[in-house]
Image (cartoon, helix red, strand yellow):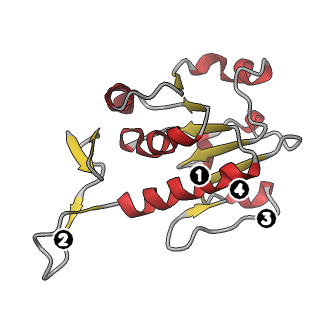
Amino acid sequence: MIININKKNYHVNHNEFSTKTIQGLENLRLLNNVGLFERLVSLIIEFKACNIQNLLFFDTDHGGFIPIEASPFFDNITLLKTKSFNLVNINDNIKLHNIKNITIIDDQSNLSTDYNNNVININKSIIFANNFSDIPSDILDDSKDYFLICKIHIDLIKKYKYTFRLKKSEYYI
């Protein structure tokens, strides 16, 4: 399915960016999650001022909307542990928008090896995941400087002393 967001087309799955209506404004086409995702993109771009060099996304969905929208502002964006049913749309959108700085690592068998050999660098990075449990624990190295953005999870609270909630969302930093 192709949807248009801010005059850009995106290939997405049928259950992503569903349309909602508001009584009295039935002619207005509102897409679920677009406002939240635009806020997350803006937050990620603001972190660029903290000398952030890399973005890592775990289990990317919604056609890769967030990494694609953030791509003009970063040199290296890596997508990890992306489910196969999302890869087709993400690859189509990367080609459609002529994105050159997004790398997809789809072989998860050597993810820890890639991390240990510095193929995946989390230092001075933003790590984004819809679910904290999608991130391999050995990647979250306390000796590195990074921002983690994900939905709340009990292990997140146990691991990190400071967590901050993004207002009107399920996401924490």
Rounded to the nearest angstrom, the CA distance separating label 1 from label 4 is 23 Å
Name the residue rendered at 39%, 29% in the picture. 94
Circles 3 and 1 in contact, beta carbons < 8 Å = no
Q: Is residue 33 visible?
A: no
Disc 3 vs disc 1: which is toward the camera? 1
Q: Give the residue number, with chain letter if any, for mark 1.
A: 45
Label ID, residue 101: none
Rounded to the nearest angstrom, the CA distance separating label 4 from label 3 is 10 Å
Three-letter code for the amino acid on which mark 2 is drawn? Thr
Disc 4 vs disc 3: which is toward the camera? 3
Rounded to the nearest angstrom, the CA distance separating label 3 from label 1 is 21 Å
Name the residue rendered at 29%, 51% in the picture. 5
Q: Give the residue number, with chain letter if any, for mark 4.
A: 156
Q: Is residue 96 visible?
A: yes
Where residue 28 appears, x then y in whole percent? Answer: 16, 69
Where residue 12 appears, x then y in whole percent? Answer: 29, 40
Three-letter code for the amino acid on which mark 1 is drawn? Ile
The residue tagged with tag 3: helix, strand or loop? loop
The quadrant where residue 93 appears: top left
Q: Give the residue number, with chain letter if any, for mark 3.
A: 162
The quadrant where residue 62 appears: top left
Rounded to the nearest angstrom, the CA distance separating label 4 from label 2 is 35 Å
Label ID, residue 21: 2
Circles 4 and 2 in contact, beta carbons < 8 Å = no
The residue tagged with tag 1: helix, strand or loop? helix
